[in-house]
Amino acid sequence: MSDKKHMVVAGGGRVGRRVSQFFMQRGYEVTVIEQDRDRADQQAAAATDIVVGDATHPSVLAGALTDETTVIGALTDSDSTNLAVCLAANTYQPELRTVARIADADGDEYGQFVDDVVFPERASVKTAVNALSGSDVRTFEEVTGEMEVFDIRVADGATLAGEPLSDVDLPAGSLVISAAGGARTATSETRLEAGERYIVAADPDAADTVIAAFRNG
């Protein structure tokens, strides 16, 4: 198995395209399944691989999944399609994280079948990114401009774990704002403890390096 993380996105619309771009920039390999040929062509630059087909067809879905696939996001405009895709994916790989876009007003009920639900009225790109990322890295939805702000956990094996900020060499254009998930303002003496969460702001061109430092150093 390679070190690359792989994700599958079913649906090549606006959210699907931007979500796949985000994860490509974070080092993921992304396969997008889209049955509309024109929309699939528009997606080409935002994914590692494009599968033109219906994601509910077993042969199409099975062909998109790999041994490295960690998460699948079903982001089409059909609740039934999204649920079917997630359930089918879990039959192939039970450990996959599954995220479904659900428009149904009673969409909370779908939580028993998938790991996370994204509602259209809250379905900005960052909402979908947060759901697909799980709990380790979350972006804030109300940040203005190009700056990215993360709520990020220090991985156990990160080289900066246990180090005070004064000794940590983070890239220019980044700043640790607070410790312990926002409970305390960070200072030069703040230690970045493994397992703890920190709020970090970064310019777009520094974001990848910051995340890598917190996740694995």
Image (tube, grey):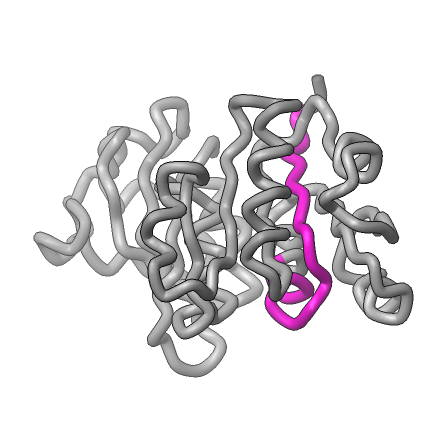
Whole-percent x, y for residue 217 in the image: 47, 34
Horizontal placement of 75 versus 157: left or right?
A: right
Q: In the figure, residue 135 lies in which quadrant? A: top left
| Residue 8 in view, yes or no | yes
Q: Nearer the viewer, residue 151 or 202?
A: 151
Q: In the image, is residue 28 above or below residue 194?
A: below
Most distant residue in the left direction: 184
Q: Nearer the viewer, residue 162 or 179?
A: 179
Q: Nearer the viewer, residue 93 or 112?
A: 112
| Residue 173 in view, yes or no | no
Most distant residue in the top direction: 1
Identify the residue at image location x=63%, y=33%: 88
Whole-percent x, y for residue 18 in the image: 63, 66
Which residues are drawn in magenta? 3-19
Horizontal placement of 185 versus 120: left or right?
A: left
Q: In the image, is residue 176 above or below residue 77?
A: above
Most distant residue in the bottom direction: 145
Q: In the image, is residue 191 above or below residue 103?
A: above
Whole-percent x, y for residue 67 in the image: 70, 22
Horizontal placement of 197 versus 71: left or right?
A: left
Q: Is residue 214 magenta?
A: no
Q: Quadrant of the N terminus?
A: top right
Q: Is residue 7 magenta?
A: yes
Identify the residue at image location x=85%, y=48%: 51
Whole-percent x, y for residue 31 in the image: 75, 45
Q: Nearer the viewer, residue 178 or 126?
A: 126
Q: How many marks?
A: 0
Identify the residue at image location x=19%, y=49%: 181
